[in-house]
Amino acid sequence: MTVNADLAMVNLDSSDPAGHAAFYHRLLGWEVTHSQPEYAMISGGGVSIGFGLVEGYQPPSWPDTSGGKRYHLDLYVDDLTQAEKEFVAAGASKPEFQPGGERWVVLIDPVGQPFCICRRG
């Protein structure tokens, strides 16, 4: 292959783009660069995450043993326990099923999308 691409951004389906962006702005500290009811975006470190309104959005179930694997975000943190407390206080929830042991924690964001927090290094 002779053509290489650069990742411009990741877009996530959402039932509440502005709220979704505000949640990840709080977790990552990235700037909210666009916020409307139908689409919002945060940017940091040369990468952006967009949140697009999908009417009738249904979040994936966790764990979903009958469906195919979907993508999710992994976030590095220095202190897994502290990050979990702060992220839950910001609006995330912690599902019962946790496959990571002490290496990572699965959380669910306010619109139902799973994401992981992973111990840095």
Image: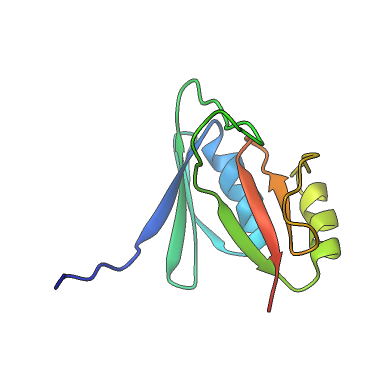
Point out residue 67 in the picture as x, y percentages from the top left corner: 52, 31
Q: Residue at the far left: name it.
A: 2
The residue closer to the viewer here, 14 or 37, is 14
Q: Is residue 100 left or right of residue 11?
A: right
Residue at image x 52%, y 39%? 17
Q: Residue at the far front: name it.
A: 65
Residue at image x 79%, y 62%? 83
Point out residue 1 in the picture as x, y percentages from the top left corner: 16, 70
Q: Is residue 86 above or below residue 120?
A: above
Q: Is residue 121 left or right of residue 96?
A: left
Residue at image x 50%, y 42%? 70
Q: Residue at the far bottom: name it.
A: 121
The residue closer to the viewer here, 88 or 36, is 88
Q: Quadrant of the C terminus?
A: bottom right
The residue closer to the viewer here, 77 or 2, is 2
Q: Quadrant of residue 65?
A: top right
Q: Quadrant of residue 103?
A: bottom right
Q: Quadrant of residue 73?
A: bottom right
